[in-house]
Amino acid sequence: MPRLDVGPDLRLLVRVVRHPEHLRTISAEQFSSLIDLSQSARLLGWLLDQADVHRGPDPGWLSDRLITARARAREYERALRWEIDRLDRAFLGTGVPWVLLKGAAYVACALPPGRGRRVADIDVLVPEEHLATAETALRHHGWQDSALDAYTSRYYREWMHELPPMIHRERHSVVDLHHAILPRTSRLHPPTSRLLERSILTDGDVRVLCPAHMVLHAAAHLFHDGEIAGAIRDLLDLDALLRGFGSRSEFWPDLVREAEALELTRPAYYALRYADRLLGTPIPMEAHSAMDRWKPLAPVARLMDALVERTLLASGVSSAAAFALYVRSHWLRMPPLLLARHLLRRALRRR
């Protein structure tokens, strides 16, 4: 089911996400509440970065809370770096080319969205022909298959873009082993070979997607087959990536070129549009010109504006809009007959 209720009352967090300068005006008690809200939304690292810029001196009790929060954020990042190191060791000598995705990649190359990052799982991309070798290597280093029923395991292995999650028997870290960035049954099929060929080596000797592909993957994850309801962090990731990479002269032409080469123009359109509209992300004219080519029909664009703006930064429950976007993501993920069978089976299992 879609994430219709994304946590406690998020109005204060939504206001600060839209306008971080409001941190200067809120009370110590409100900021303390904001620490809890950002923790539940997995935005603690982002909030602490903004507080360094926008908060003045705070009372002693709040300073103590901030010390604890900063220690927690450092521990999230340290633990993730350790898991990346363990993955590097697991794949050493196997001949498997592997690339970190999303949050782990942001941490590996010290990007702003990686600061204080807390992740539910670590996403790794490998060529499909190396899946079996990669899976075996992870098993040898302590990651085990999830306890899934036969249908769910088949769902992952035959239709999705990843294997079932693997959980470490001691550290309980979760690895999602991908062979693509969108499901096999998706209407879009960006070639994994192009992503791997253009991947780049970090200072820590692990590979991540190139800047254009990193943004396009984040866009596809949020606006093609992912859940939009309450995905505040995903939008902020896009904003931070676009602001950080956007200062490089080669980035925007490459983003436009790769969006078209990977058939990800529509997710890219939505990512740029809503980053601009909701967070004021600077988008240059050359990207706006490309967006004019990529945009959907006017009725679809108006409907998406209404749904996304009611859902993406929702401060509470927005059932109708969130459910509509949930259905849309599944419609894009699977052909109609397979989708109907899948949703019927899930409904029967819930009953």
Image (cartoon, rainbow, N blue to C red):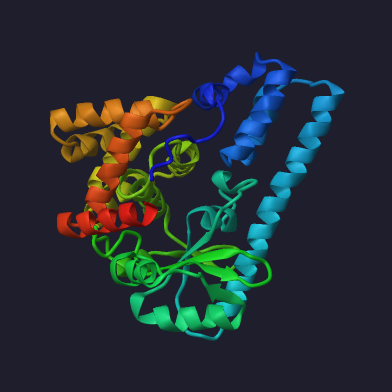
Depicted 214 relative to depicted 93: above or below: above
- In the picture, the quarter occupied by the N terminus is top left
Q: Position of residue 183 (x, y in %)?
A: 30, 61
Q: Is residue 271 left or right of residue 246?
A: left
Q: Position of residue 256 (x, y in %)?
A: 27, 46
Farthest residue in the front direction? 351
Depicted 168 relative to depicted 115: above or below: below
Quarter of the image where one finds residue 107: bottom right
Q: Nearer the viewer, residue 129 or 246?
A: 129
Residue 228 visible in image: yes
Quarter of the image where one finds residue 13: top right
Name the residue at 13% across, 33% down. Answer: 297
Q: Is residue 60 left or right of residue 41?
A: right
Name the residue at 84% across, 26% down. Answer: 61
Total labels: the figure holds 0
Q: Position of residue 142 (x, y in %)?
A: 62, 77
Name the residue at 19% across, 36% down. Answer: 295
Q: Is residue 91 left or right of residue 197?
A: right
Name the residue at 27% across, 58% down. Answer: 342
Residue 250 visible in image: no
Q: Position of residue 150 (x, y in %)?
A: 38, 73
Quarter of the image where one finds residue 270: top left
Q: Nearer the viewer, residue 319 or 187?
A: 319
